Image (cartoon, rainbow, N blue to C red):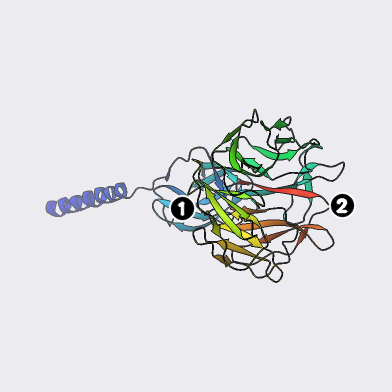
Amino acid sequence: MKSIKMTLLCLGFFLFFGCAKKEQVNPTEEPTLEEVSGTITVKSGGEFKIKGSNFSETERYVVKFNGVQAEIVKITESEITVTIPENITSGDITLEHNGKTAKVASYTVASTKVYIFQYDDGVKKLAEINLETGDLTYITGSIDYGNNTRGIVYSQTNEEFIGFDFDSNFKPFIIKIKPDGTTSEKIYLKGTGKNFRDLVIDASGKVYIFQYDTGVKKLAEINLTTGDLTYITGSIDYGNNTRGIVYNKTNEEFIGFDFDSNFKSFIIKIKPDGTTSEKIYLKGTGKNFRDLVIDASDKVYIFQYDTGVKKLAEINLTTGDLTYITGSIDYGNNTRGLVYSEVNDEFVGFDFDSNFKPFIIKIKPDGTTSDKIYLKGTGKNFTDLVIVETK
């Protein structure tokens, strides 16, 4: 009997401590999150991964973007993957589990804003365009600018627009415009030059302009405080009929478009150290081009508006071959620049129809286009399409 009691006691001892030991091996732990510093940018419809440890497929988690619940698509021990909801506003990403809420990160929503300058008498204001309705929201009062502009750029570094124009005496100047509507005084370009175009900004926020006076034809960096010009090239056979210049971040070079004396169209590549490529002639018989534009991957495009063509084409920057990415589009007679939205992966162009009514059009890289989106109001004079993105 004593032997049986001892056996039972040993068995109970083993079961108790055996169970206790098993529970210690598999405890229920709260997940540990990896800290996300600063403010990140997110895009609705994209994916977001919460990184950490101790996540489990059998547990219930709730992820919210500023209070809007996200769909969880995958859980592993070290990650929770969610789809970012639509119609969110900037705020915090939170994770709820077992009645506890933890902050994952602060975020802002990726956005695209496109602006245009209206220079009708009595207006002369910069306006944001509603890309769905065509409504204009003026962000400035009336500015003494807009009659002979040569493009406008946006500096992410200084959060300001920089425009170029000539005054009533044909003296060239730049002007800086803040998104809150405040503007600088006119900053006159130094020197005796009278012929300028192709305002462009590089990846570091430096602004350049091409001077094409006889015997000059040089690309110059502009001192945005004094108006002094620092020429970064020698004289280039370029500049009489340019149609814009873009900056390639990957190759650290400017790409310009022009026609030669025989009206043959070409591009030219210009390095910040002043070296330039040979002219790279566009292949084919086209004669009418404008709206040079570059996308996020540094592919360069141009719009050809010869009769029966009117297509957007990618340019092979080595051979000059054109690859059309669209069919024929009712666009291209009086365009005022084309911009590319990295957030929406689309081009936005501006033109006037046959009745001189201004409109924008959106073009996807797969060739699909929106309907014409007419600008609201009675304005007839617009120029300087420019894009500002949070991405």
Which sits earlier in the primary sequence, circle 2 or circle 1? 1
> What residue does disc 2 label?
378
In the displayed structure image, the side of residue 354 where residue 94 appears, left or right: left
- Label 1: state its secondary structure: strand
Residue 216: image location, x then y, percent: 61, 40
240 or 360, which is in the foreground? 240
Q: In the picture, residue 331 is in which quadrant?
A: bottom right
Q: Which amino acid does label 1 sit on?
A: Ile
Residue type of the residue flagged with mark 2 = Thr
- The residue at 78%/36% (across/down) is 167
Q: Nearer the viewer, residue 183 or 323?
A: 323
In the rendering, at what x and y percent does residue 283 appear? 57, 65
Mark 1 residue crowding within 10 angstroms, few (<14) / some (14–19) / many (20+) = many
What's the distance in space between the residues labelled 2 and 1, CA to CA? 51 Å
Q: Mark 1 points at which residue?
A: 80
Residue 43 or residue 335, whichever sits in front: 335
In percent of width and height, residue 295 lies at 57, 54
Whether label 2 touches label 1, CB < 8 Å: no
Q: Is residue 120 in view?
A: yes
